């Protein structure tokens, strides 16, 4: 589920002065803050024009904030806190947050755009448009592609701005849906390095499904799940990507960014894959959606 914006009192003016950010092209509407000074003035102005064009034509807003480090604050919390301070009375906006030294990125989406920029699309934009450019320190190029992609999504779906996903649509499993602040249980699967975690259904989840589905339906579900998991494992093996199957409810993964704690029963989403890499934010992928291009892009394979 997307995180929604709520009002938040924040001394943003003091933050700008402290960080020495550039003046935006239109401080009353365009929100770009580059405290790391990775954008040239020309690049800054070009991004502002892209954003202003969207605001003038649709009314939706895109904000960008570039910082050096989160100082161990989870990017989810920092991004939401910043988003809440920026035009707090509007839900029709998206905020791109980039922590350069931490190599973390996030796209926070207001409730008015939740039905357009889904969790999967936000992750795809980060993976396909931003990450390849950022690896080459081409921050303007990555941000410009992201702004262009978000703008196009909003333009092409302007009729559903403000609408929420229908209640009968199943929630797509997301990384945030699995994350927990800490794990107190002693039974933990410890992981590190570059790999893909293949998430299996737990006994509790199977028990819940037995109440919902007939024996024949459940058999079909398990057969399909087994097939897609097997295909995913074969594809990962063919590309030389290590993959392991979940063996416990709780998983702890450490990379250079932070420690990630997962509760695999927090979402009722068995049979998904969690991409894990030393210098990237983990990513959740459905077994039915995995393909060679996604794997190569995430793990930076040739």
Image: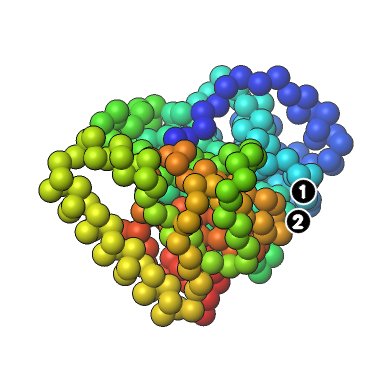
Write down the residue under mark 1. 69
Q: Pointers 1 and 2 in contact (CB under 8 A)?
A: yes
Secondary structure under the numbered disc 1 in the rendered image: loop
The Cα–Cα distance between marks 1 and 2, rounded to whole angstroms, is 6 Å
- For the residue carrying disc 2, how many other residues have a C-alpha within 10 Å: few (<14), some (14-19), or many (20+)? few
Residue 246 seen in render: yes
> In the figure, 73 relative to 193: above or below?
above
Secondary structure under the numbered disc 2 in the rendered image: loop
> Percent from the top left, x then y, of residue 139?
66, 59
Q: Earlier in the sequence, mark 1 or mark 2?
A: 1
Q: Nearer the viewer, residue 166 or 45?
A: 166
Q: Nearer the viewer, residue 196 or 89?
A: 196
Viewed as shown, does residue 203 lie left or right of 103? left
Disc sitting over residue 23 in the figure:
none
Q: Quadrant of residue 116?
A: top left
Which residue sits furthest right? 18
Viewed as shown, does residue 258 lie left or right of 248? right
Q: Nearer the viewer, residue 61 or 203?
A: 203
Disc sitting over residue 101 in the figure:
2
> Percent from the top left, x then y, of residue 119?
45, 44
> In the figure, 26 relative to 201: above or below?
above
- For the residue carrying disc 1, how many other residues have a C-alpha within 10 Å: few (<14), some (14-19), or many (20+)? some
* Figure quadrant of the N terminus: top left
Residue 79 seen in render: no
Viewed as shown, does residue 43 lie left or right of 15? left
Name the residue located 28 percent from the left edge and 61 percent from the top edge: 226
């Amino acid at each position: 589920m997307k995180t929604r914006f709520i009002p938040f009192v924040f001394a943003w003016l003091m933050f700008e002065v402290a960080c020495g950010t550039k003046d935006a092209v239109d401080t009353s509407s365009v929100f770009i803050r580059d405290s790391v000074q990775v954008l040239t003035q020309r690049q800054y102005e070009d991004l502002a024009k892209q954003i202003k064009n969207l605001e003038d034509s649709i009314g939706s807003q895109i904000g960008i904030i570039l910082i050096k480090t989160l100082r161990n604050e989870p990017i989810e919390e920092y991004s939401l806190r910043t988003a809440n301070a920026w035009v707090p009375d509007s839900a029709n906006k998206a905020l791109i947050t980039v922590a350069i030294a931490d190599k973390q990125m996030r796209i926070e989406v207001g409730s008015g755009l939740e039905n357009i920029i889904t969790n999967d699309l936000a992750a795809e934009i980060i993976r396909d448009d931003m990450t390849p450019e950022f690896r080459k320190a081409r921050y303007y190029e990555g941000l410009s592609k992201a702004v262009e992609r978000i703008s196009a999504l909003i333009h092409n779906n302007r009729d559903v701005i403000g609408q929420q996903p229908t209640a009968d649509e199943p929630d797509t499993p997301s990384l945030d849906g699995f994350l927990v602040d800490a794990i107190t249980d002693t039974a933990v699967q410890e992981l590190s390095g570059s790999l893909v975690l293949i998430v299996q259904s737990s006994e509790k989840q199977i028990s819940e499904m037995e109440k919902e589905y007939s024996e024949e339906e459940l058999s079909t579900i398990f057969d399909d799940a087994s097939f897609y998991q097997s295909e995913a494992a074969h594809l990962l093996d063919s590309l030389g990507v290590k993959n392991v199957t979940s063996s416990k409810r709780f998983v702890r993964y450490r990379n250079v960014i932070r420690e990630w704690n997962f509760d695999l029963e927090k979402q009722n989403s068995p049979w998904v894959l969690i991409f894990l890499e030393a210098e990237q934010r983990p990513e959740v992928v459905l077994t039915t959606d995995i393909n060679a291009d996604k794997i190569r892009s995430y793990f930076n394979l040739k």
